Amino acid sequence: DFSADQKRYLEGFVSGVQAVRGSRGAPGFGGGVPFGGQGGEKGLPANAEQVPSGPDAIHLEAMARQEKAGKKLSPQEKAKRDEHPFDAYARLKGLAAEGKFAKQLDDFRIRFHGLFYVGPTQDAYMCRLRIHNGILKSWQFRGVADLAERYGGGFTHVTTRANLQIREIGAADGIAVLEGLVDLGLTARGSGADNIRNVTGTPTAGVDPQELVDTRPYAKEWHHHILNDRSLYGLPRKFNVAFDGAGRIAALEDTNDIGFQAVEVLEGHGVEPGVWWRLALGGITGHRDFARDTGVVVPLDQAIRVADAIVRVFISNGDRTDRNKARLKYVLDAWGFEKFLEEVEKLLGSKLVRAPSDAIAPRPESDRLAHIGIHPQKQEGHNWVGVGLTLGKITCVQMRQLADIAEEFGDRDIRLTVWQNLLISGVRDDYVGEVERRIAGIGLATSASNVRAGLVACTGNKGCKFSAADTKGFADMIASHVDAVGLVVDTPINIHATGCHNSCAQHYIGDIGLIGARVPVGEDDTVDGFNVHVGGGFGTDATIGRELVTEVKGEDCPALVEKMLRGYLAHRADDQETFA
Ligand code: SF4
């Protein structure tokens, strides 16, 4: 006696089986099959009354409903419906064989596979990987270095989703990178376009002395769940999920569409005491919203099931006509939490558990500098070593050397963080000095000024066509200038530089946030510059920064930031007072 919604939900769980039966009419294998299978015009079922079936049904129904209501689907929605990006693989591989890049709607389709054509900034592909919880093995890290050297620019970037990107890939080599990643037990599938992005978690999971939950198995389970269910690709827009285990390094889960926060529920509130996930929804800081507490707590082993249901409600109800309004936040804004959660409960077939906020113990404090330097693990006599990278960039030579260090002195894990750096874990006390020396010897550091430790920048206009400024270049100039003038800031400071309103570097959550702007000079020329925000924060200090000054030339930003920092140091009440 399942309802129609519950049946669709259950179909999702068996969609792998349906895909294998694709030869009998369900969409699936074979090039050029439209999203809607062997149906009629534009992939819709041949008979308009016929209910779409198979793993794409949930998307097709949502598209059809919005068209029936007189709305115009976005070109990207039509592209997905006309030819499912996964079915285009052989054709896109053919383009590579001809030495051609996938452009326009094919660029959109190839992003489902993890490749991005980044012209006109560069006539090249960027490949964004997926690394669940941001943790990979030393041999995988070395293998990525080999791929980046052979097919890319000889370096990688650590991203703000604890992930790696390979850049400067030629047209003929993109597919070789994708297939080379699979050889390494990695993938780039679904890392771009309208898909669920890299699954982040606490970078010190399993070694953190204060964590409530080791997030690794949850991030891994969700990673494989979404990778292996075709109905969970091709959402109305991108979607982010993060697991915070309450460790010492912030996972920024409150900037995600779904943030699972490990919390301790106290006795005496009608909910079984112990560790649960608190459910936060709708984070998208580029649109000035953090994920908000829903009042729901989820048993640890139910996170994947609940996340699956949330995504399906979003797939059915997200806007497919205006891509600026197509994120989960806008469904929540239109419906309110209660209606949204009711829909989730219908799919789950059971009520979610509510816990009042006073039933939740405060989160153990995070440490804004725990991603840099030496920190003791919960395993006695062992440490993680946080390695600073210049705005996430690391050469292939350095990658191999770090892999060597992790193998010789650590537990062979390389842990990427959302702070665009990495940790080597499992280093015994007596090896710490040698590890620091070896890291210094390859041109990297295990210490950084407070300004540099909290410096984050997106790709910027050296590699992203949306950027109004060279974010990484000017962010680096700011930190170098502060160091050069001998200004010492004795509290952690976050400076985030982002190139456009997509806000990959989350400028609204920085103590100082910069967003790229073209600054007019003379009659009809412009130069790189920024609008400057101040007073953002995250976690327990979550605040959206406010605009302070606009159209500052990039070259003037170092002096401006110096002035702001000096003003802060001179006028703060004490070193606990933040920019907010
Ligand atoms: Fe590109 Fe904008 Fe993202 Fe920066 S914030 S990487 S400019 S899309």
Image (cartoon, rainbow, N blue to C red):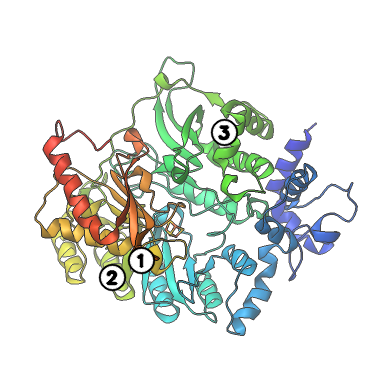
Of pointers 1 and 3, the one earlier in the residue sequence: 1
**Which quadrant of the figure shows ligand 1?**
bottom left
Closest to the observer, 38 or 400: 38
Residue indicated by mark 3: 333
1 or 3: mark nearer the eye:
3
Of pointers 3 and 2, the one earlier in the residue sequence: 3
Q: Is residue 251 left or right of residue 237?
A: left
> Split into 4 quadrants, where in the image is the N terminus?
top right
Where 429 sits versus 71, above or below?
Answer: below
User: What percent of the width, then of the height, locates residue 473?
Assistant: 29, 65
Q: Is residue 309 left or right of residue 517?
A: right
- Give the residue type at disc 3: Asp
Residue indicated by mark 1: 138
Which residue in the rendered view is the most extreme toward the left? 486
3 or 2: mark nearer the eye:
3
For disc 3, the neighbor class at 10 Å (few under 14, some 14 to 19, many from 20) is: few
> Split into 4 quadrants, where in the image is the C terminus?
top left
Mark 2 C-beta closer than 8 Å to ligand 1: no
For disc 2, the neighbor class at 10 Å (few under 14, some 14 to 19, many from 20) is: some
Could you say which disc has been placed on residue 404 in the image? 2
Question: At 49% across and 69% down in the image, what residue appears?
Answer: 118
Q: Is residue 464 left or right of residue 309?
A: left
Q: Is residue 527 visible?
A: yes
